[in-house]
Amino acid sequence: MGQPSLYVVATPIGNLADITLRALDVLKRVDVIAAEDTRVTVRLLGHYGIATKLMAMHEHNERHVAQRLIDLLANGKSVALVSDAGTPGISDPGAIAVALVREAGYPVVPIPGANAAISALSVSGNTARHFLFHGFLPQQQTARRRELAVLSNLQYPVVFYEAPHRVVETVEDMVGAYGAERTISVARELTKLFETVHVCALGDVAAWFAADANRTKGEFVLVVDGAGAPAMDMDMPRRTLEILLRELPLKQAVKLAAEMSGGKRNELYRMALEIKKVESGQA
Ligand code: SAM
């Protein structure tokens, strides 16, 4: 495998076929795989006939296991890190081990693949150029509402992870923070048998859940639209120009009005000539 390295390997988020050829090759060839839950990973490895040794690494023993990984690397071994599903370190353990291994001087290599947030965003139809990945909200309602109130003013979509037993109360809190008009994309059970993507107004989502009890089962990603840019004041360039023309020569007024209003200089020039014409009574 070349230089002893830590490979951070993305695994499927449902459909076992969603794993890259490179990920399978790495999982086969490393000496040890540190896995969030070895029972989950053993199923994946079994499916692909991979017999690599596993080591449990979860939230509560990550530092300790990271030290064991560093010892293995020091002995010339290569190791991989996987979580139960998707990309390690994304709302999953992994980041601490990555930092400690790098600090110890060993290369950390990403093996990219499935991720629930990006999958949900890719089928949301959201045309925004930016987004915020927020992951899980607090479980406690007051803290959750506070966090949503802050997020609701952002102009770009926000991507949330949510557990099935909280999804209904979370979307209710979202209506409170964002209002009923905002669009939400509910991505449920992606890549699995009951995959569902439902896009609607936030005000309609509770009724959609209530219409079929199965709709609240499984794993969820919620993508909520951004607040949108403030409405453009179409008259602003003209009003700016009118004021500046009272005090300044035409060329200078046009230049400043373009800078202040963001309007196009040639259009403002034409407008300025028009204003002057009206003022002189020639129009
Ligand atoms: N590391 C993972 C990733 O890269 O997406 C995320 C792990 S996080 C502990 C698990 C959460 O991701 C779930 O509660 C759910 O919100 C979301 N998730 C994972 N798999 C999903 C799927 N197949 N469909 C929808 N959401 C999913």
Image (tube, rainbow, N blue to C red):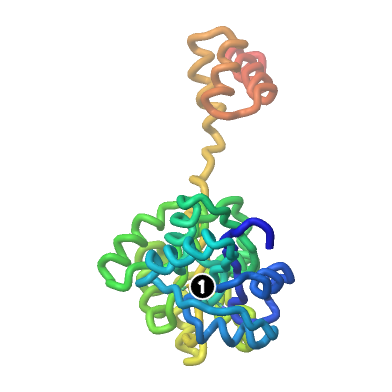
Mark 1: amino acid:
Ala
Q: Residue at x 51, y 75 (%)?
A: 35
Q: Say above or below: 254 vs 137.
A: above
As drawn, which residue projects farthest toward the front? Answer: 75
Can you identify the residue that label 1 sits on? 34
Which residue is located at x 66 percent, y 14 percent?
282
Residue at figure coordinates x 47%, y 80% from the top left: 37
Between residue 80 and residue 111, name the one nearer to us: 80
Which quarter of the rendered picture does the N terminus lie within? bottom right
Residue at (60, 72) in percent of width and height: 31
Q: Is residue 213 above or below residue 148?
A: below
Q: Secondary structure at mark 1?
A: strand
- Which quadrant of the figure contains the C terminus? top right
**Residue in front for this viewpoint, 225 or 254:** 225
Image coords of residue 68 (percent x, y): 45, 67
> Residue 257 is drawn in which quadrant?
top right
- Residue 70 in the image: x percent, y percent? 48, 61
Q: Does any portion of residue 180 appear in the rendered image?
A: no
The one nearer the camera, 239 or 169, is 169
Where residue 137 appears, as percent x and y from the top left, is 37, 67
| Residue 125 location, quadrant | bottom right
How far across and how far down the image is residue 90, in percent? 49, 64
The residue positioned farthest toward the top in the image shown? 249
